[in-house]
């Protein structure tokens, strides 16, 4: 199944460059962020963060019609979650942004969709997402229920890039991709191969 539309939630230092990397390969990309200023800035073909070479690629992607930013989720074929996972006072990771992102896309999911968690997260985060989505969408099946035959595929692919070199490392660095099933892993690999040379 091909990925015609790619959704990226969280348009910060990881999410925006990732969205642009797909858009540069002429894929329709929907970016979502809760920050209205960030959304407005991106839709003007400008950037709200500091990263070399990102401004030119955002401008090109927006002007060509491949990148559009919103404050509310939209339908897509692949959903990438790239939201913050800060530490709480007790040094435990705060997954509230991740879970809120997952819950926001739940109503939009359809059979054949792929979800990838890119946020740096502790072990078990993808399973938590899958459990929450299954509770919200009993009309669809998830990997923990149907394995390889699930309606929705879920994978994890954390980013490892250095600020100042994101647009190079995002494309050239090797990736570690782990799906909840072999099919999820294969589909996530297929998605990243759209722009990845690592």
Image (cartoon, grey):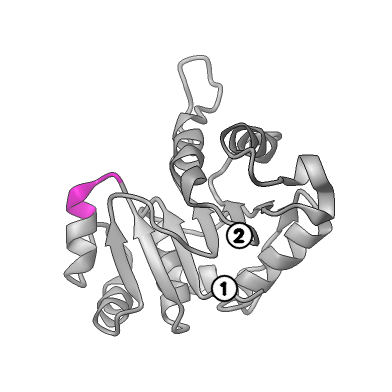
Q: What residue is shown with label 1?
A: 3
Q: Residues within 10 Å of mark 2 (few under 14, many from 20)?
A: some
Q: Is residue 163 visible?
A: no
Q: Residue furthest top?
A: 90
Magenta span dominant secondary structure: helix
Residue for point 52% across, 56% down: 80
- According to the picture, the residue beneath numbered tag 2 turns out to be 113
Rendered image quadrant of residue 30: bottom left
Question: Total number of numbered labels?
Answer: 2
- 124 lies left or right of 103: right
* The label number, if any, that marks residue 101 in the structure image: none
**Label 2: element kind:** loop
Cβ–Cβ under 8 Å for marks 2 and 1: no
Is 182 left or right of 107, judged from the image as shown?
A: right
Q: Which residues are magenta?
A: 34-38
Could you say where residue 110 lies in the image, as x and y percent from the top left?
Answer: 57, 56
Please name the residue shown 17% across and 51% down the image: 37
Question: Mark 2 to mark 1: distance in Å?
Answer: 9 Å
Picture coordinates of residue 197 (x, y %)?
A: 63, 79
- Please say if 147 is above or below 5: above
The quarter of the rendered structure image containing the N terminus is bottom right
């Amino acid at each position: 199944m091909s990925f015609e539309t790619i959704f990226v939630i969280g348009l910060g230092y990881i999410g925006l460059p990732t969205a642009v990397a797909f858009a540069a390969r002429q894929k329709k990309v929907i970016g979502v962020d809760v920050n209205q200023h960030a959304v407005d800035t991106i839709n003007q073909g400008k950037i709200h963060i500091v990263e070399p070479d990102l401004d030119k690629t955002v401008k090109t992607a927006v002007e060509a019609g491949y990148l559009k930013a919103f404050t509310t989720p939209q339908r897509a074929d692949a959903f990438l979650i790239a939201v913050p996972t800060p530490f709480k006072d007790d040094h435990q990771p705060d997954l509230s942004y991740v879970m809120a992102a997952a819950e926001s896309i739940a109503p939009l999911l359809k059979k054949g969709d792929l979800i990838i968690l890119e946020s740096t997260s502790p072990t078990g985060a993808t399973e938590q997402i899958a459990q929450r989505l299954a509770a919200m969408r009993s009309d669809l099946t998830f990997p923990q229920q149907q394995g390889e035959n699930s309606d929705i595929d879920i994978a994890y692919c954390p980013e490892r890039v250095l600020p100042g070199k994101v647009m190079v490392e995002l494309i050239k660095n090797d990736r570690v991709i782990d799906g909840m099933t072999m099919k999820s892993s294969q589909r996530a690999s297929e998605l990243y191969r759209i722009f990845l040379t690592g």
